[in-house]
Image (cartoon, grey):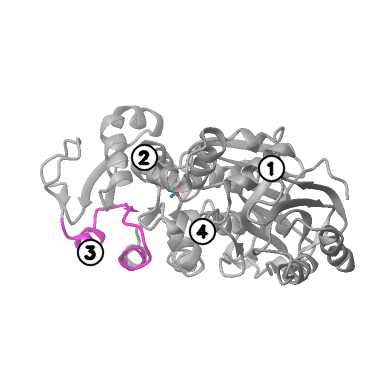
């Protein structure tokens, strides 16, 4: 039986999962592939730690650069992470004519355009199913299953850590800090958890998905990013009273000559399917003109779910090699390189949606009319108002829901309201996505 040789760079959590899957399910994979995926070499700085995997003699080595240069490695799997040595090794694997698999969403979001160009000009493939949504086949879905569709929108819960934190606060009354510590113990959080909680990890992922869906260059820098660190239990409680749950959403929509791509905490109705995606789970909905709505739901991180996606890429690449499809059978970013355009991402000021505002206002006659007067002057119409309690520390939370409004107007109005003497703290704003609201 033909053997396809795999070289693995980095044997941390996910790397170990990949090794385990390739070794434990070797016969199963061979029965499906018609060739053996042979874990030829694994490079890691630590080759003595017990990973619970029995590597054949000589497989574990320290020198990653040497692995990349080995002539009989067919596919290099980069599981190191980060943007430094990982990028260097991927570029040198490509230059050496190796196909590459990576789960490195931060690297692809920042340098993907350069890496895909390098792979295309060398005639090798760079696959990355595990970079978004762990085991969920979202890359395959966009690149293959929906290839005949014009995609109009994607909405995703793409960070397990944030979803876990919000679920714990909402359902169990946990504190933010306790919930984050638990997520770190579960091994979901990034090495630097601010990447999770401030929304950057989610932005990396939606930048990649937007490129695949809309035929655009990967554009991370123009995406509006807001994390969950300013969400309070009070906002979560108010959301519940209005029939909403707060989720960190990645939203990407096609406009005529631009895309609207944003990451922020969002109120969604209880009957929105994403409302029921809780704990560390991820989900993404995609809307195509032929398919309608599709939902993928599953484990977005973790050793074996992520390894599952990596092995799927390995088998696809091996099929290109043995079944005659050849490299380039699937364009890396779903569109032929010459058809990938630089499509502008709308500034957050240009979007229009529905809003939740929370003001800490002095409980005095006339305050509400001053606040609503400012909103009215900026063309923001109020749909609902609620005041909670009376004179806690001299001020009370006043919550308003708006009809559809323009973000630029909302920002100006909130700046004016925040500057009022009768408003005690910076106003809070959470965007709402609710299909049932028509205006
Ligand atoms: N830190 C990420 C998460 C891991 O919490 O979902 C997967 O990319």
> Which residue corresponds to mark 2?
186
> Picture coordinates of residue 232 (x, y %)?
58, 50
- First of labels 4, 2 by sequence position: 2
- First of labels 3, 1 by sequence position: 3
Query: In the structure shown, which secondary structural element does the residue marked by tag 3 occupy?
Result: helix
Assess disc 3: are there few (<14), some (14-19) or many (≥20) residues with their C-alpha within 10 Å of its C-alpha. some
> Which residue corresponds to mark 1?
239
Q: Residue at horizontal 49%, vertical 54%?
A: 197
The answer to which quarter of the image holds residue 227 is bottom right
Magenta range is: 62-90
- Residue 355: in sight, yes or no? yes
Query: In the structure shown, which secondary structural element does the residue marked by tag 2 occupy?
Result: loop
From the Cβ of disc 3, is ligand 1 less than 8 Å away? Answer: no
**Does residue 89 show up magenta in the picture?**
yes
Of labels 1 and 2, the one closer to you: 1
- First of labels 1, 2 by sequence position: 2
Contact between labelled residues 3 and 4, with CB atoms less than 8 Å apart = no
Query: In the structure shown, which secondary structural element does the residue marked by tag 1 occupy?
Result: helix
- First of labels 4, 3 by sequence position: 3
> Picture coordinates of residue 215 (x, y %)?
65, 60
> Which residue corresponds to mark 4?
198
In the displayed structure, would residue 96 be above or below residue 179?
below
- First of labels 1, 4 by sequence position: 4
Cα–Cα span, label 2 and label 3: 32 Å
> Picture coordinates of residue 275 (x, y %)?
64, 36
> Which residue corresponds to mark 3?
65
In which quadrant will I find the N terminus?
top left
In the picture, measured across the screen, residue 397 lies left or right of residue 89, that is right
Cα–Cα span, label 3 and label 1: 52 Å
């Amino acid at each position: 039986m033909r053997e396809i040789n795999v070289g693995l760079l980095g044997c941390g959590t996910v790397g170990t999962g990949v090794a385990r899957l390739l070794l434990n399910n070797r016969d199963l994979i061979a029965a499906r592939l018609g060739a053996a995926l042979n874990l030829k070499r694994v490079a890691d700085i630590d080759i003595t730690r017990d990973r619970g995997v029995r590597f054949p003699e000589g497989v574990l080595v320290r020198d990653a650069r040497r692995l990349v240069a080995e002539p009989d490695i067919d596919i290099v799997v980069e599981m190191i992470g980060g943007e430094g040595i990982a990028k260097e090794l991927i570029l040198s694997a490509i230059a050496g004519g190796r196909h590459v698999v990576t789960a490195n969403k931060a690297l692809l979001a920042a340098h993907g355009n350069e890496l895909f160009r390098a792979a295309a000009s060398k005639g090798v493939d760079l696959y990355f199913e595990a970079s978004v949504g762990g085991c969920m086949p979202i890359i395959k879905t966009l690149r293959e299953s929906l290839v005949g569709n014009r995609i109009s929108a994607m909405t995703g819960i793409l960070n397990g850590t944030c979803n876990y934190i919000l679920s714990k606060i909402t359902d169990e009354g946990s504190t933010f800090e306790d919930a984050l510590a638990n997520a770190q113990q579960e091994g979901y959080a990034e090495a630097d958890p601010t990447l999770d909680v401030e929304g950057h990890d989610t932005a990396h992922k939606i930048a990649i998905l937007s490129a695949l869906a809309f035929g655009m260059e990967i554009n991370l820098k123009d995406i509006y990013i807001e994390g969950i660190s300013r969400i309070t239990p009070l906002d979560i409680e108010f959301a519940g009273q209005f029939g909403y749950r707060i989720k960190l959403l990645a939203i990407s929509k096609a406009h005529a000559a631009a895309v609207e791509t944003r990451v922020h905490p969002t109120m969604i109705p209880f009957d929105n399917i994403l409302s029921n995606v809780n704990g560390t789970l991820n989900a993404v909905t995609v809307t195509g003109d032929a398919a309608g709505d599709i939902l993928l739901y599953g484990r977005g991180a973790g050793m074996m779910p992520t390894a599952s996606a990596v092995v799927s890429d390995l088998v696809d690449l091996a099929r290109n090699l043995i079944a005659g499809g050849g490299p380039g059978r699937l364009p890396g970013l779903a569109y032929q390189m010459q058809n990938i355009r630089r499509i502008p991402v709308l500034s957050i000021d240009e979007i229009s949606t529905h809003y939740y505002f929370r003001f800490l206002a002095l409980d005095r006659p006339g305050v509400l009319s001053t606040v609503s007067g400012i909103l009215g002057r900026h063309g923001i119409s109020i749909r609902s108002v609620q005041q909670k309690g009376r004179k806690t520390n001299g001020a009370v939370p006043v919550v308003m829901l708006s009809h559809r409004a323009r973000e630029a107007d909302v920002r100006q109005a909130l700046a004016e309201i925040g500057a009022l003497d009768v408003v005690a703290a910076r106003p809070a704003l959470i965007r709402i996505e609710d299909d049932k609201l028509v205006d």
